[in-house]
Image (cartoon, rainbow, N blue to C red):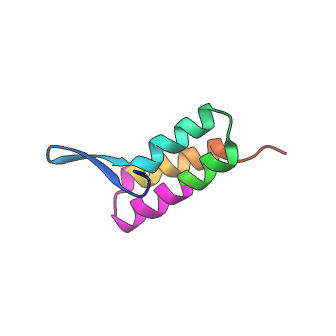
Amino acid sequence: PWSGLFSFVGTCTMGPIDLTLARLAALLDRPEEAQALAQRALEQAEHAKAPIYVAAAQALLGEAAPTT
């Protein structure tokens, strides 16, 4: 239910919740779900103009890419 939101602690953000959900999906060996969540996190971070989280999502997309 928290997908699509940013997490906040006081006045700072911990980034898109989808980043954490993508990492969890990857850990649970759900690469397609992980990639979709990482892509959503990337779009959120780009929209928020948050380069740290853009880079984190891009790195996760590279890790979550299906192997052939």
Residue toward you, 65 or 9: 9
Q: What x and y, as percent, mark residue 30?
A: 67, 40
Residue toward you, 60 or 7: 7
Residue that lies at the very extreme toward the right in this rendered image = 68
- How many numbered circles does the render carry? 0
Picture quadrant of residue 28: top right
Q: What x and y, as percent, mark residue 6?
A: 33, 53
Q: What x and y, as percent, mark residue 4?
A: 42, 58
Picture quadrant of residue 10: top left
Q: Is residue 46 magenta?
A: yes
Q: Residue at x 60, y 31 (%)?
A: 27
Highlighted magenta segment, given as a residue range: 39-52
Q: Is residue 25 left or right of residue 32?
A: left
Q: Residue at x 42, y 51 (%)?
A: 1
Q: What x and y, as percent, mark residue 22?
A: 54, 44
Q: Quadrant of the C terminus?
A: top right
